[in-house]
Amino acid sequence: MSMLSLIVFLPLAAAAVLAAVPAIGPAAARWAWIAVSVLEVLLVAVVWAGYKDPGPNGLAFEEQVPWIPGVGSSYHVGIDGLSLPLVAMTVVVFLACAVYCLRDSDRPRVQAALFLFLQSMSLGVFVSADLILFFVFFDLSIVGMYFIIAGWGHGNAARSALKFFLYTFLGSLALLLGFIGLYVFSAPHTFDIPELVAAPPLAGEPLAGGLVLAAILVGLAVKTPTVPFHTWLPPAHTDAPAAGSAVLAGVLLKMGAYGFVRIAMPMLPEVWRAWAWVIVAVGIVSVLYGALVALAQTDLKRMIAYTSVNHMGYIVLALGAAGLLVEGAEQARSVAVTGAMVQMVSHGLITAALFLLAGVMQSRAGTYDLGSYGGLAGPAPRYAALFAIGAFASLGLPGFSGFIAEFQIFAGSVAVAPVTAVALVGIVITAALFLRALQRVFTGPAAGRSPGFADLRAHELWSAGPLLALSVLIGVLPLVLLGVIEPSSAALVELVGR
Amino acid sequence: MQMSPGLLLPEIIVFTGGLAVLLGGSFLPRQRQWIARAAAALALLGAATAAAVAMAGPAQSAFAGTFAVDTATGAARVIATLATLLILGVASGELKDSPRESDTYALLLFATAGVMVLAGITDLLVLIVGFLLASIPLYGIIGLTGGRLGAEAAVKTYLMGALSGILLMLGVTVLYALAGGTDYALLREALPTAPDAAVGTGILGVLAGLLFKAGGVPMHFWVPDAAQGSGVTAATFLTTVPKVGALVAVYRLVATVSAEEHSWLLVAALLATASMFLGNLAAYWQTDPRRLLGWSTVAQVGFLLVPVAAAGRSDLALPSLLFYLAAYAVTNVAAFAVTAALPEHRTLAEYRGLARSRPGLGLTVLVALLGLVGTPPLAIFVGKLTTATAAWDGGHGWLALVVVVNSVISLFYYLRWFAPVFARPDSQAAEFPGRGGMAAWPAVTAAVAATASLALGVLAGVLWAALDGPGIL
């Protein structure tokens, strides 16, 4: 078994053991969860250390085993510069969740099994090099998330989980329809991603190609989510448990954005270019709409959820701009794609940290309502400091990963299409809303539920803290990440330009 | 052309097994009826083995070209016998030591033999025989195992069966008159030159008969009543096994008549669409899990008709149909077996909290229902994927869209069932029975069937290789 298969299936095996053996006690289950998550981080570190860029349309650590040869589908996994950073981000976010849940008392054994299952599925999505394999993991991640929201959520969890399941399931089936279209129009028929990239189906068929791309775009847009397919996100986040929200925002949303760079762009380059302006427009609308609606929220989790719509909008905007063929702008388009990839990692780390910190509010005072707090920096200075760092990271302050990402996105996009500068307004609004939230909750005299608010405990500090530290690390030393991403984004731009 | 009765060995084994169980059962004391059950299981296993061995050989025809022994027949035989074997597991919970135990087993075997015959027939006159062989024991099973509602279900099924049988015979008569024969090979040559309206009437009549057996729109009215009103053994059987033979028969007929006239593929596509939408929408607000499953099987027939619309136009059509049949059989049996394991729980609300007190059974519900939705990597996912691909490959891209839309629609009502299973139990909720007792067999059967649906999905390549043979004769 190769490294990647081990990384994908180790959590699944651990989940199966935890689910099947009721004799495992709560403490043992929690520590086993942490141990597996640490092991995963180490394994990914080994892969990162041994990673060499595989070249255009190549995959490192590749492994292929026939699965259903009759329909040209195989168990095919591999990584490149687009997937490796997301794999690394995924294992880090899941480790943070494992640490965060160390003091949870609600059925820890089943909870650990579910999160480990979800971790397997998430990693599977990012390493799949076969459309059906990708879909299997993509769909099962929805099932896992449904049970986390329904089983451990609060408020109207059952209803939010139902909405989440139906909505994202609809998206995943639209995606499947697009995959079938790619298969039907490929010659020879195959679901293999590198083969489809090497010989893109539907070349010279704008109508059929447009319909297939539309199906894939709808599927990915629901997951990302972009306006107007985002309505499932706020209720799901509001009612999900903190660790569930962290995984949902940090990892699951990336599956949609990742699908654009892995599937839609390289396989349907012609139609992607033809529809690039529409995609750019959707990105701009998502940025502005997400920011404005976030500004109007009084519920902290809903606010962060809408900033996710805003942040994911930047990614869509950059990827759309990468499809605009402008004379001599090869470099700029590549910068935009690199920025989008950094944004995926950055948003994963920062938003996961913010949701974990928001969960602290719920566990202490039982509400996310911003108006219920005031002067929280007095009783909880460490919490205030960490939250402030998270907020500054999220609004894209230099020194954090978000700045590297958004700077590259705009540097690339504006060079290709100056009109995308409109989206810069989104950054200003995000800055305003985070500063306002910080001010309302943390400054002034202690009011509302703030008095007696216990400061961060060790497991809370050591879950959100390292995520933000990584964001700072990327912000200060971006080359570690950019060195991996850049060759692959240059290759992707090349593929889109075909 | 020769008789070669040896080619019908699997059918002969099942039928004589049925006779042996019927006669032997009469001489067994009520507490030792398990011997009859064991004999029935042995006959089914023997027939499945014989069928699998025959599948490895070349495709042949028996009885002067009226019966084809090819990949489709072989697959249908194996699926039908193994599904009935699983249903014996369901029956063990319901019928153990009941007065009609061995009689029911015998009827199950006779009906299975009829279904196997139905799958291989390539001649209209023999098709009538297969239809009757598969139908008559079914009326008996529904009437024998149901209570008061069972009588109503039996009458309804019998009346629908009689009507569709007449339509079938009418259709056969018309086609016989037009083609001057009833052999499919002859129909293929003669029908394209015959008057369209008459050919249409004939084929629609035959299709009506077969759709009754399959439980598809528009001959589906008996399905939900029978699924709800009859005993769980009968409900499981009649929503699972007859479909295997009927759909292979539909495939053979459509492949024959659409060789020259493409519009029959469109008819199949429309029938598939109607079944999917009607079954799914009617299942929406059902509160009885068994009735909900009844409507869900109507929708599943729609999904199963999708590859028929690509008959002869896509290499995937036949193997995907056979794969879906296998996947459907195990998944549907798993879902019904759960209801057999909880015979007193007849509303969806009563399943609330099941996963806390019976985690294994809760997980089985989840696997069965997600399986019916078509969630990967369960078997029906591969079935839906390949059938939708076949339809698009065969020129009906919109049908793939209909499949997707209906899968989303179906998720909602399956969720209405399994969401309570995993919810917090109510304080005043009914107790769930323990693991032992009468319901042990159905619970084990459900687990086995659910595991099989997972295994078929994960190991899909192996099964696909077996089904991707020379196709139909």
Image (tube, coloured by chain):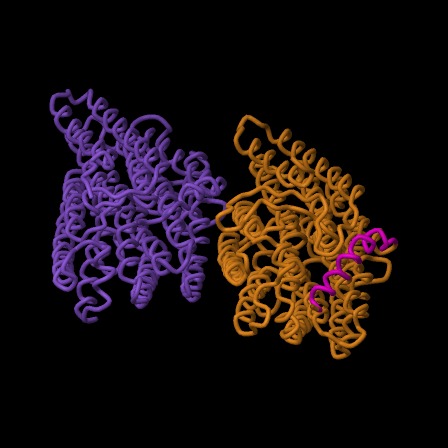
Viewer-proximal residue among B249 and A48:
B249
Viewer-proximal residue among A27 and B19:
B19
Up/down of B401 relative to A207, above or below:
above
The image quarter containing residue A422 is bottom right
Viewer-proximal residue among A315 and A463:
A315
The image quarter containing residue B216 is bottom left
Percent x, y for residue A493?
73, 65
- Which chain's colour is orange? A
Residue lying farthest bottom?
A: A419
Residue lying farthest front?
A: B1
Percent x, y for residue B455?
46, 38
The image quarter containing residue A448 is bottom right
Q: Residue at x 34, y 63 (%)?
A: B269
Percent x, y for residue B135?
17, 46
B67 falls in the magenta region: no
A490 falls in the magenta region: yes
Magenta region, main secondary structure: helix
Up/down of A408 relative to A378, above or below:
below
Percent x, y for residue B361?
41, 36
Count the numbered circles shown. 0
Up/down of B299 relative to B13, above or below:
below
Question: Which region is colored magenta?
Answer: A477-497
Up/down of A175 relative to B336, above or below:
below
- Which chain's colour is purple? B
Q: Pick the quarter of the image with the N terminus of chain B.
A: top left
Query: Can the viewer see residue A1?
Result: yes
B289 horizontally vs A464: left or right = left
Query: Can the viewer see residue A445?
Result: no
